[in-house]
Amino acid sequence: MMLFSLVLSISPGPVNLVALTCGFNNGLLRSIPFVSGSTLGFVTLLFATGMGLGEISLYLPSAYDYLKYLGCGYLLYLALAISTSKVAEPNEDPRSNTFSFSQGWLMQWLNPKAWVACLAGCSAFGVYESDTRFSLFIGIYLVICFVGIASWALLGSKMNSVLRSHRHIKLFNKLMGLILAVLATALLFS
């Protein structure tokens, strides 16, 4: 369970790319609300999946398709927001470019990678048969997911100390927006 949680929490994906961008633009401390929202969003999705929400996909396969379209649309919206975000001026409130707790939470519920991780994890570890296993899985994921997403935000904040010019920051934001858009498109057609 720990290895599964670590691999899926630390591997590149939409949430981690946004955490990297948030850390780059705002630093680690100002990224904590997004990281916390993403973590709790994922854990509530995992809980709902373990409680039976995942079985809806068995009876309504088109529900997953609608979720995929909605999620990819949201990711494309975020990609545009990231790539067109302006660089904060020294006298400007740095929180103006920060992603919020609620954006992190919502992003997980609209993230196809999160749904696949929840469905696969609940099935692989038999959480439907054991409340103890289910509780353990949620507890493990809570800690590891937070550390995994926060690691990306920390990496972003460390990258910012190297790339300080406005030009570099704009280029970084455009690149992250492009990568997120490509990832959203790939998820849409997978």
Image: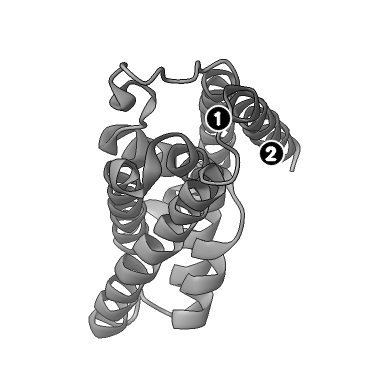
Q: Residue at x 54, y 25 (%)?
A: 82
In the rendered image of this protein, does residue 161 appear above or below residue 83? below
Quadrant occupied by the C terminus = top right
| Res 69 quadrant in image | top right
* Residue under numbered circle 1: 75
Relative depth, front residue between 55 and 72: 72
In the rendered image of this protein, does residue 81 appear above or below residue 111? above
Q: Secondary structure at mark 1?
A: helix
| Res 176 quadrant in image | top right
- Amino acid type, label 2: Leu
* Residue under numbered circle 2: 183
How much space separates mark 2 and mark 1, taking CA atoms?
9 Å
Q: Are marks 2 and 1 in contact (CB under 8 Å)?
A: yes
Q: Residue at x 36, y 40 (%)?
A: 104
Q: Is residue 1 visible?
A: no
- In the image, residue 68 lies at what x, y percent? 57, 35
| Res 183 quadrant in image | top right
Q: Residue at x 39, y 36 (%)?
A: 26
In the rendered image of this protein, does residue 98 appear above or below residue 8? above
- In the image, residue 37 lies at what x, y percent? 29, 45
Tell whether 33 sits left or right of 2: left
Relative depth, front residue between 3 and 115: 3
